[in-house]
């Protein structure tokens, strides 16, 4: 059995594959190259960079599995793969804590003007009196989407002394001290709003939603690009309709949106929600174990 690891895997994951006698090759290929190479492999493991499309699946004559080191499988034509009897594996939950922590990194950065202070200090300025920030304690956090990541964010927020409002399209059952509310109420009442929804939930935050928010509100997107309309977000920032935004996921990546990235009220990161050593180790171990389980049947 031979697996193509297109976007990398942790050393722990590699060791599990080796111990179980599974050969693998680590190499990223662009789409046209991948079409030529995939017939040699019994499986392919990807992260975010590689898209496993219908033509790739058709070219993979010997594919016994397609694996994604991460939660979302939107870069895989998973329905087509499964309709052809090819299992699609992923690692839900492996990077949830890392993403949740990045939410708070952006919240603190925005509340305490850390990006602005960092830039101006590097220019030799000392604007101590300019940056009058906010404490998170006592503020209201609105969480849109209450899956694994949303629940971890809620626990952290409660620990910080925040009031937590939750909105989700599915029935929510939880023992956490949160208030389950309608979407409009969440938008009106929240000081911070964080999104944890799948990619298919496009444009759930647009101009209409920004109109409901407090002018002091901050919005955080570590979820998927496109769930917040970037044009409407930029307009809301420029008009002062909201106070700021923390963005880790963009509609197009790398993003060609310099006006948004360089806005002074924005904290940005290049889609690094899952980019911690701990998350990568967990992902590598979990996906390797799942690959072994399928190939050893």
Image: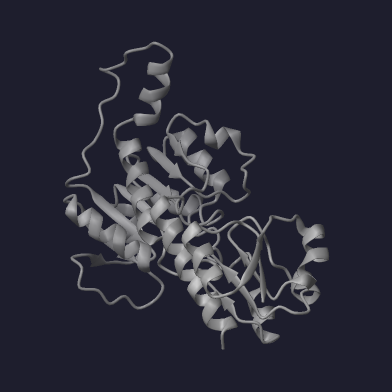
Q: Position of residue 247 (x, y in %)?
A: 47, 45
Q: Quadrant of residue 42?
A: bottom right
Q: Is residue 46 left or right of residue 182?
A: right
Q: Which quadrant of the figure contains the C terminus?
A: bottom right
Query: Camera-side residue: 291 or 131?
Result: 291
* Identity of the residue drawn at 39% across and 61% down: 96
The answer, for residue 198, to whether it is visible in the render is no
Asked if residue 43 is positioned above or below residue 294 in the image, the reply reads above
Q: Position of residue 289 (x, y in %)?
A: 48, 74
* Identity of the residue drawn at 69% across and 55% down: 28
* Identity of the residue drawn at 68% across and 86% down: 83
Asked if residue 258 is positioned above or below residue 31 in the image, the reply reads above
Q: Which quadrant of the figure contains the N terminus?
A: bottom right
The answer, for residue 41, to whether it is visible in the render is yes
Asked if residue 129 is positioned above or below residue 165 in the image, the reply reads above
* Identity of the residue drawn at 51% across and 52% down: 228
Q: Is residue 59 left or right of residue 115?
A: right
Q: Position of residue 102 (x, y in %)?
A: 38, 48
Q: Position of residue 12 (x, y in %)?
A: 46, 61
């Amino acid at each position: 059995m031979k697996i193509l690891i297109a976007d990398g895997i942790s050393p722990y994951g590699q060791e599990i594959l080796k111990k179980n006698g599974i050969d693998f090759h680590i190499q990223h290929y662009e789409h046209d190259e991948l079409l030529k190479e995939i017939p040699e492999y019994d499986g392919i493991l990807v992260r975010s960079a590689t898209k496993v499309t219908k033509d790739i699946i058709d070219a993979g004559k010997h594919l016994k599995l397609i694996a994604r080191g991460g939660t979302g499988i939107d870069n895989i034509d998973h329905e087509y793969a499964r309709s052809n009897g090819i299992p699609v594996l992923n690692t839900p939950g492996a990077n949830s804590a890392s993403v949740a922590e990045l939410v708070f990194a952006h919240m603190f950065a925005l509340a305490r003007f850390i990006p602005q202070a960092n830039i101006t200090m590097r220019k030799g300025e000392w604007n101590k009196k300019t940056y009058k920030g906010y404490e998170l304690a006592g503020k209201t956090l609105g969480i849109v989407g209450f899956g694994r990541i949303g629940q971890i964010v809620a626990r952290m927020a409660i620990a910080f002394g925040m009031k937590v409002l939750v909105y989700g399209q599915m029935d929510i059952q939880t023992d956490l001290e949160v208030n389950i509310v309608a979407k409009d109420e969440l938008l009106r009442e929240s000081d911070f709003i964080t999104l944890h929804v799948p990619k298919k939930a496009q444009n759930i935050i647009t101009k209409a939603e920004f109109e409901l928010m407090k002018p002091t509100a901050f919005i955080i997107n570590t979820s998927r690009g496109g769930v917040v309309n970037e044009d409407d977000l930029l307009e809301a920032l420029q008009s002062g309709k909201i106070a700021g935004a923390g963005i880790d996921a963009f509609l197009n990546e790398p993003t060609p949106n310099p006006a948004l990235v360089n806005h002074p009220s924005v904290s940005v990161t290049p889609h690094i929600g899952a980019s911690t050593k701990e998350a990568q180790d967990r992902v590598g171990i979990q996906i390797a174990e799942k690959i072994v389980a399928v190939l050893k049947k």
